[in-house]
Image (spheres, rainbow, N blue to C red):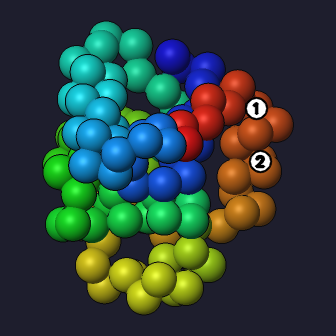
Amino acid sequence: MENKVIFLTTDSMGDGDRELGVQLLETYFTLLKQRESLPAAVFCINRGVFALTEQSFASLHLQELAARGVAVLACGTCVDYYGVREDLTAGEISSMGHFMELAQRYEIVTLA
C-alpha cells in the first residue's frame, strides 16, 4: 500500500443504500488502519471531505491513520464549498495541485 494514494470522492461507499455505504466506508478504514502496510496518503474531494468531520465515524479511523504517518488531506475548494472548514476533525487542507503531484508519484485508488 505504500505506493498508493486513496482518493475518496464521497462520504459513503457504493451506489446503493446510503446507510450501508456509510457502514462500508467505516469498515474499509477500520481494516485499512489495522494493516502493517499503509497508503502514502488519503486525499478527500467533493463529499469525501465530510468523512473528515464528526458527521462520519470514518473520521476516527482517519485520525488514527494520520497519527501513523499517513497524509490525510482535504481539498480546500471542497471544504469551503460545503462550509466545513471549521468542522474538520481529521486531516489537513490541501489543493488539487498537491493531488496532481501525488498522482505523479503514486498509484491512485479511487473510492466512490
Residue 70 lies left or right of residue 32; in this view the side is: right
Q: Determine the residue positioned at 75% across, 39% down.
A: 103
Q: Is label 2 in a helix, a strand or a loop? A: helix
Q: Determine the residue positioned at 70% across, 26% down.
A: 107
Q: Is residue 110 visible?
A: yes
Q: Is residue 14 above or below residue 81?
A: above
Q: x%, y% of residue 57?
A: 18, 51
Farthest residue to the top: give it.
Answer: 36
Amino acid on which the number 1 mark rests in the picture? Arg
Residue 41 lies left or right of residue 33; in this view the side is: right
Amino acid on which the number 2 mark rests in the picture? Glu
Q: Nearer the viewer, residue 11 or 38?
A: 11
Mark 1 and mark 2 in contact (Cβ < 8 Å)? yes
Count of numbered marks: 2
Q: Which residue is mark 2?
A: 101
Q: Is residue 66 visible?
A: no
* Rendering quarter of residue 13: top left
**The C terminus lies in which quarter of the figure?**
top right
Q: Which residue is mark 1?
A: 105
Local crowd at mark 1 within 10 Å, few (<14), some, or many (≥20)?
A: few
In 3D space, how far apart are the residues under numbered discs 2 and 1 (Cα atoms)? 7 Å
Q: x%, y% of residue 22?
A: 29, 46
Q: Nearer the viewer, residue 5 or 51?
A: 51
Q: Is label 1 in a helix, a strand or a loop? A: helix
Q: Determine the residue positioned at 35% across, 45% down.
A: 17
Q: x%, y% of residue 105?
A: 76, 32
Q: Is residue 81 above or below residue 8?
A: below
Farthest residue to the front: give it.
Answer: 17
Q: x%, y% of residue 41?
A: 51, 39
Local crowd at mark 2 within 10 Å, few (<14), some, or many (≥20)?
A: few
Q: Determine the residue positioned at 30% across, 71% down.
A: 88
Residue 54 lies left or right of residue 6; in this view the side is: left
